[in-house]
Image (cartoon, rainbow, N blue to C red):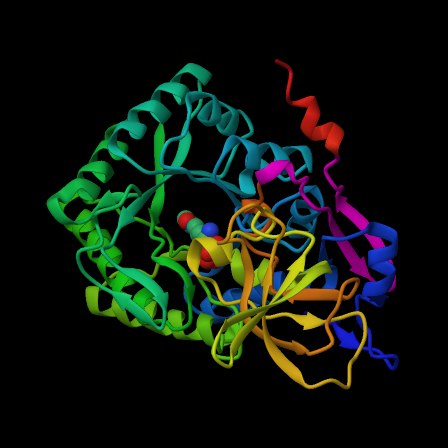
């Protein structure tokens, strides 16, 4: 993160606070969020897209709360002028309790409950992103019951599936999200929304994947969505004025990843959209994006304390050093789940010892409980050392569990030498309190 640095005594500090102080005051494991870094990235996306699309019809950025959400984050996002994408009643509840204005919230989800739809409409959300034909009727019915009109976007499946530099442009319709462009489902959905008494069609939505590094996938997806916009104009005589192109911008988990800047992404996509609209003789719609990972991910590191260090003989000259830390797959399941490639560093001190490749593992009762598969740490890494795993701000806390009855770590914000608890550490009482049988 922006304010992470090694001090003269070799320890890492972030937001002006040393990891030793964090370990002492907060304990480990802990998610350490660099507030300036998070807010800087949020504003950078907001400004880059606003700037690049200003000559067109403008662009907004919604922060995707699924990456990481709590009251403080909702307030920062609000103050920094972004919208907020929520995909469950729980995320919506966090946003509303933080005072996030309803009109800047987008509600997603492929299986929204009636209660979630009702609550969103009562809160006056700016848009409900409708994900299926039968949800059109649900939202229409709830809007009728509440005596209001619901602003909806339709999520379409473009057949583009993007991941890092590669994307596949066909045959990815076999998934639960969205309304398929092939077979006319998405067109039929537009027709039904336009005919519905209590719905206003605000636009179309497409999300193609996550951890994406270039604009190729967006180019294909935008074209397919704009083809539908043109078809709706030609056949239904209706102008669709807004398009959301989703999130998915990649972050640097290791040195093989080279993320584009928000400016490069924004100007690249603006150029693509402008060209395609020109070809189709369409007015350029207002565009929005929903980055989550690229805002939250780099802001946070997980701070662990080393416990058992085990040198395992693998036959012949081979061996592997297992460095166990006091958390694991309950606070970062991404390595186990997605084969994610994190790095780590000895953060409490420097060592003159040669680096050696180690595997950082957690404390769970499962051999797949790996946090960092292979990374260099000094050969004298030992019990009591502090180890940091960077870029854990997205989809780590939000995917955390209580596997093996391990309480979830706190999330603390650091800024200008101050520590502020955003989410407190779970306690044994919290866990036992759920057990009421
Ligand atoms: N918008 C929609 C409709 C989405 O489904 C997602 C992510 C986003 C925005 C934000 O995408 P981002 O900018 O964060 O890539 N748990 C997985 C990631 C799941 C992403 C789901 N949808 C992981 O840890 O990699």
Instruction: From this view, report whether residue 412 is shown above or below residue 199.
Output: below
Question: Which of the pair 316/211 is nearer the observer?
Answer: 316
Whether residue 16 sits left or right of residue 92 in the image: it is right
Q: Residue at x 61, y 57 (%)?
A: 393
Instruction: From this view, report whether residue 81 is shown above or below residue 390.
Output: above
Q: Quadrant of residue 360?
A: bottom right
Question: Which of the pair 370/15 is nearer the observer?
Answer: 370
Residue 209 in the image: state x and y as whole percent: 37, 58
Residue 117 in the image: state x and y as whole percent: 45, 26
Q: Residue at x 68, y 36 (%)?
A: 99
Tally of marks:
0
Image quadrant for the C terminus? top right
Whether residue 291 sits left or right of residue 229 in the image: it is right
Q: Quadrant of residue 370?
A: bottom right
Residue 268 in the image: state x and y as whole percent: 40, 75
Residue 247 in sight here: no
| 426 in magenta | yes
Question: Which of the pair 148/1 is nearer the observer?
Answer: 1
| 210 in magenta | no
Q: Residue at x 25, y 32 (%)?
A: 133
Instruction: From this view, report whether residue 287 is shown above or below residue 141.
Output: below
Instruction: From this view, report whether residue 153 is shown above or below residue 273.
Output: above
Image quadrant for the N terminus? bottom right
Residue 243 in sight here: yes
Residue 12 in the image: state x and y as whole percent: 79, 72
Write the start and end of the magenta stretch as one range.
402-427
């Amino acid at each position: 993160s922006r304010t992470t640095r090694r001090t003269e005594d070799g320890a890492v500090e972030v937001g002006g606070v040393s990891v030793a102080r964090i370990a002492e005051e907060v304990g480990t494991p802990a998610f350490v969020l660099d507030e300036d870094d998070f807010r800087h990235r949020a504003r950078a996306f907001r400004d880059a897209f606003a700037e690049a699309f200003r000559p067109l019809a403008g662009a907004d950025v919604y922060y995707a709360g699924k990456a990481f959400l709590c009251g403080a984050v909702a307030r920062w996002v609000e103050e920094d002028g972004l919208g907020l994408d929520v995909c469950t009643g729980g995320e919506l509840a966090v946003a509303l309790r933080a005072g996030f204005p309803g009109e800047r919230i987008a509600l997603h989800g492929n299986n929204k409950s009636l209660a979630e739809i009702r609550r969103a409409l009562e809160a006056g959300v700016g848009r409900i992103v409708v994900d299926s034909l039968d949800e059109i009727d649900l939202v229409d019915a709830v809007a009728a019951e509440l005596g209001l009109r619901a602003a909806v976007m339709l999520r379409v499946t473009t057949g583009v599936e993007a991941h890092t530099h590669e994307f596949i442009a066909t045959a990815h319709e076999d998934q639960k999200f969205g309304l398929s462009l092939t077979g006319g489902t998405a067109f039929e959905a537009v027709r039904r929304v336009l005919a519905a008494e209590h719905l206003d069609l605000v636009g179309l939505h497409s999300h193609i994947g996550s951890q994406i590094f270039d604009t190729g996938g967006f180019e294909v997806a935008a074209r397919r969505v704009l083809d539908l916009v043109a078809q709706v104009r030609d056949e239904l005589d209706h102008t669709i004025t807004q398009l959301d192109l989703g999130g998915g911008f990649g972050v640097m988990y290791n040195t093989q990843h080279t993320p584009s800047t928000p400016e490069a992404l924004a100007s690249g996509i603006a150029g693509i959209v402008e060209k395609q609209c020109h070809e189709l003789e369409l007015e350029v719609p207002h565009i929005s994006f929903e980055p989550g990972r690229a805002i939250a991910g780099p802001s946070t590191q997980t701070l662990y304390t080393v416990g058992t260090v085990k040198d395992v003989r693998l036959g012949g000259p081979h061996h592997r050093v297992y460095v166990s830390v006091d958390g694991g797959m309950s606070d970062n399941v991404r390595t186990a789940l997605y084969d994610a490639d994190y790095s780590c560093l000895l953060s409490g001190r420097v060592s003159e010892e040669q680096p050696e490749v180690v595997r950082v593992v957690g404390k769970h009762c499962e051999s797949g409980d790996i946090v960092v598969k292979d990374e260099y740490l000094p050969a004298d890494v030992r019990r009591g050392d502090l180890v940091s795993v960077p870029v854990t701000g997205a989809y780590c806390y939000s995917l955390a569990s209580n596997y093996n009855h391990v309480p979830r770590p706190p999330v603390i914000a650091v800024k200008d030498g101050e520590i502020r608890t955003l989410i407190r550490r779970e306690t044994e009482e919290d866990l036992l309190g759920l057990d009421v049988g």
